[in-house]
Image: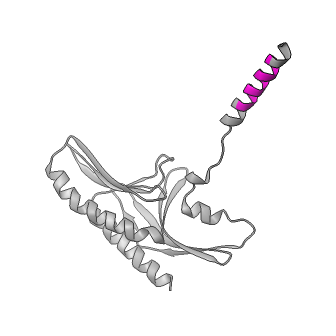
Amino acid sequence: MKKQIVVACLLLTLSIFSWSQDTSSTKDQTSYDRFLSKSGTMIRFQDYKMPELRGNYQTYENRIRILTVGADKSEYYQIVVTGKYSSVTGSISYEDMSETIKAIDLLLQAFQSDNALKPDYLENKFVTKDGVAIGYYISSKDSSWYINLDRYKSDSTVFIKDGQILKVAFYEAQKRMDILGK
């Protein structure tokens, strides 16, 4: 009887430890990370600078990155927030650009009516498939547009005073991607 209790406790302990182990899920990986994770192949990066994105507190580097992994090719619009000790890069795939631009247009339309409400606080945003959030907040004192490049990292938010700046930046990026993709 004692052996059965000891074996049961041992099995229970082992199952708890194995269940609590950190498993790296591909569910949390972005399409950029998944594309780069192919091993045993040649990986090539090509960057094309875009005009700097002027934010409330600093200017931000943004670029078109073309990745070639083996025979596969993919394009991304990237925005980089450079901090004191590190930088954060948000990537939006070419496949998501049209949907993101449509969302920015809808956000621009909604901003006017939301601002007229004079709320204590209101936030409206669009989140891409890879977790980049684009939107605005309105508070009783001010309002601002933002892009949150990584939901898991601090200091990864770009603040921009006017949503039209975002619209122009994304339209220009998509046009450049169209040209480079040919």
Q: Which residue reaches farthest front?
A: 1
Percent position of residue 30, x then y: 54, 58
Residue 87 in picture, x, y percent from top left: 53, 55
Quadrant in which residue 53 is drawn: bottom left
**Looking at the image, which residue is at 66% across and 62% down?**
37
* Residue 11 lies within the magenta run: yes
Residue at 68% in and 75% down: 70
Q: Which residue is nearer to you in this view: 10 or 130?
A: 10
Span shown in magenta: 5-15
Side of 122 relative to 21 (left or right)? left
Q: Position of residue 95 (x, y in %)?
A: 47, 71
**Residue drawn 35% across the image and 68% down it:** 101
Q: Residue at x 83, y 13 (%)?
A: 1
- In this figure, which colouring scheme has been used for the structure? one colour
In the image: residue 138, left or right of residue 8: left
Residue that extends furthest to the top in the rendered view of this protein? 2
Residue 5 or 31: which is nearer the viewer? 5
Q: Is residue 146 visible?
A: no
Does residue 93 belong to the magenta stretch? no
Q: Is residue 3 above or below residue 104?
A: above
Residue 168, placed above or below residue 81: below
Q: Quadrant of residue 23?
A: top right
